[in-house]
Amino acid sequence: MQSGAAQTTAEGKTLLKIQDLSFRYPGESADELGILALEGIEVDVREGEFVSIVGPSGCGKSTLLSVVGGLVSGFEGSVSIRGEEVRKPHPDIGVVFQEDSTFPWRNALRNVEFGLELRGVPKEERRRRAQEILRLFGLEGFEQRFPGHLSGGMKQRVAIARTLVLEPEILLMDEPFGALDEQTRIILGEELLRIQQELRQTVLFITHNIQESIMLSDRVVILSARPGRIKAVMDVDFPRPRDSTLISSTHFAELVGKIWAVLRDESLKAFGQDSQKKEANNA
Ligand SMILES: Nc1ncnc2c1ncn2[C@@H]1O[C@H](COP(=O)(O)OP(=O)(O)OP(=O)(O)O)[C@@H](O)[C@H]1O
């Protein structure tokens, strides 16, 4: 386990570079300092790599994803993709959120086609690409179903397919399986592993689930309680291709223990921050 910056030591070109990133939510009035959510974050993600960010509740994980996704401005430091600064949503960066983001009025196929329509891709090509990606996600035969007639896991697969069909260079995922039950979560994690391996997709993945981070990642970046700083970085050395059976191995349990040893202190701190906030609100 290393501590400090999450620079990669392995070979491969750096795709995403986050340098000395700090972000403060503004206060309600000009003389209020606001909330420092992130401080001095340094992460490099190289091509084809799967990097997870774990951290206690409220440590700034979603904020980090919003900054990298170009959805938030006013940060210090820099975020760049292939050396190009990110200051607004970038076509090479795809984002998938936790909550169901499918359009209920479009069937699965037309949900996946949506982004291609916006990009002006001709109908035949977008239908072919959407069908192909739905097949990759095991949704062949469900193309005409509307989200209201799909399970939670299927809807989330449609949401991921909708982003992946645009062939982003990097996929940002914010707790994409957070709303699902444990078994569906593991199965979808396995499916994501398979697809990521097939497409050699670069992924930056936010989760508070330690097991999920180990199963999926090449590296796990552990953030401190707010303000989120990099507390430690752990390489996950399971060979690929992987599947969910590695969860039962001794080495997996060792890695969970190592991450939890760091995260436990930070989670207790975050718990303290929450309690103080509640007391202040009740005073
Ligand atoms: N729009 C906002 N304005 C002010 N403060 C905010 C805003 N959004 C988030 N925060 C604060 O910034 C901190 C980081 O929030 P963020 O949602 O990034 O954390 P997180 O690690 O994703 O949390 P969780 O794991 O609970 O989802 C929290 O203390 C939160 O209260």
Image (tube, rainbow, N blue to C red):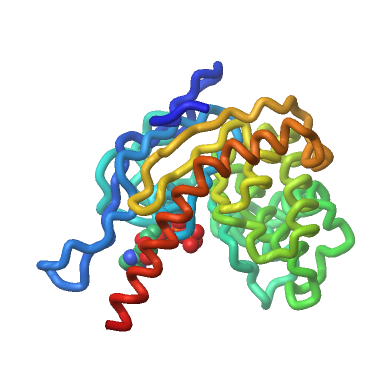
- At horizontal 50% and vertical 38% (from top left) the residue drawn is 221
Displayed quadrant of residue 271: bottom left
Location of residue 238 in the rendering, given as x and y in whole percent from the top left corner: 72, 28
User: In this view of the protein, can residue 169 be seen by the observer?
Assistant: no
- At horizontal 10% and vertical 67% (from top left) the residue drawn is 31
Displayed quadrant of residue 50: top right
- At horizontal 33% and vertical 71% (from top left) the residue drawn is 277
For residue 135, above or below residue 253 = below
**The C terminus, quarter of image:** bottom left
For residue 51, above or below residue 7 = below
Quick one: which residue is furthest to the right in this view?
141
Q: Quadrant of ligand 1?
A: bottom left
Location of residue 61 in the rendering, given as x and y in whole percent from the top left corner: 46, 52
Quick one: which residue is furthest to the bottom in this view?
282
User: In this view of the protein, can residue 233 be seen by the observer?
Assistant: yes
Quick one: which residue is furthest to the left in this view?
31
Q: Nearer the viewer, residue 115 or 169?
A: 169
Q: Nearer the viewer, residue 209 or 143?
A: 209
Q: Is residue 109 left or right of residue 176?
A: right
Location of residue 140 in the rendering, given as x and y in whole percent from the top left corner: 86, 56
Q: Is residue 263 left or right of residue 89?
A: right
Quick one: which residue is furthest to the top in this view?
11
Q: Is residue 227 left or right of residue 103?
A: left
For residue 108, above or below residue 119 = below
- At horizontal 38% and vertical 36% (from top left) the residue drawn is 18
For residue 63, above or below residue 155 = above
Total tally of numbered discs in the picture: 0
Location of residue 187 in the rendering, given as x and y in whole percent from the top left corner: 80, 52
